[in-house]
Image: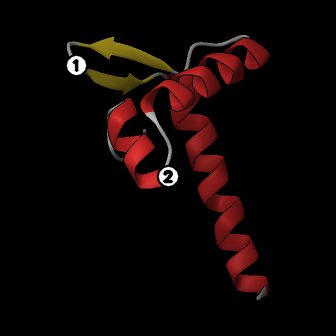
Amino acid sequence: MMTSGSLIGAARSMGSSQPAISRDLAEFQRLLGHRLFDRIGRRLQPTSHAIQIHAERRRNCLCVDLLL
């Protein structure tokens, strides 16, 4: 959703359905105790928490790539 900006786009890129992605996002947000996206019209706008998590994930992936 960080790149697609929508649940449908994220579902397509993951080979999943929009309802499944929506349920997973709701559960993840519940576990974190933070909202990750704000709905702006039909698009999803990442919150500061989502941006931080995304940046950390990207750094972790880069570190793994360097190790391989």
The residue type indicated by label 1 comes to Arg
Tell me residue 43's x, y (percent).
26, 24
Residue 26 visible? yes
Label ID, residue 42: 1
Q: Would you call the spot at circle 2 few (<14 residues within 10 Å), some (14-19), or many (20 or more)?
A: few
Residue ID at (59%, 58%): 58
Residue at 57 percent of width and 13 percent of height: 35
The colour mode here is secondary structure
In this rendering, does residue 2 appear at all? no
| Residue at far bottom of view | 68
Quadrant where the C terminus sits is bottom right
* Label 2 or label 1, whichever comes before in sequence order: 2
Residue 3 percent location from the top left of the image: 36, 47
Disc 2 marks a residue whose amino acid type is Met
Between the residue at mark 2 and the residue at mark 1, the CA separation in whole angstroms equals: 20 Å
Q: Residue at x 59, y 36 (%)?
A: 52
Number of the label disc, if any, that sits on residue 62: none
Instruction: Please provide percent x and percent y for residue 66.
Output: 71, 84
Residue pictured at 49% horizontal, 52% vertical: 14
Q: Is residue 58 left or right of residue 30?
A: left
Badge 1: residue crowd in 10 Å (few <14, some 14–19, many ≥20) = few
Asked if the residue at tag 1 contacts the one at tag 2, i.e. Cβ–Cβ closer than 8 Å, the answer is no
Instruction: Residue 14: give its label.
Output: 2
User: Image quadrant of residue 59?
Assistant: bottom right
Compared with 58, 41 (above or below) is: above
Badge 2 element: helix
Residue 37 located left or right of residue 65 = left
Mark 1: secondary structure: loop
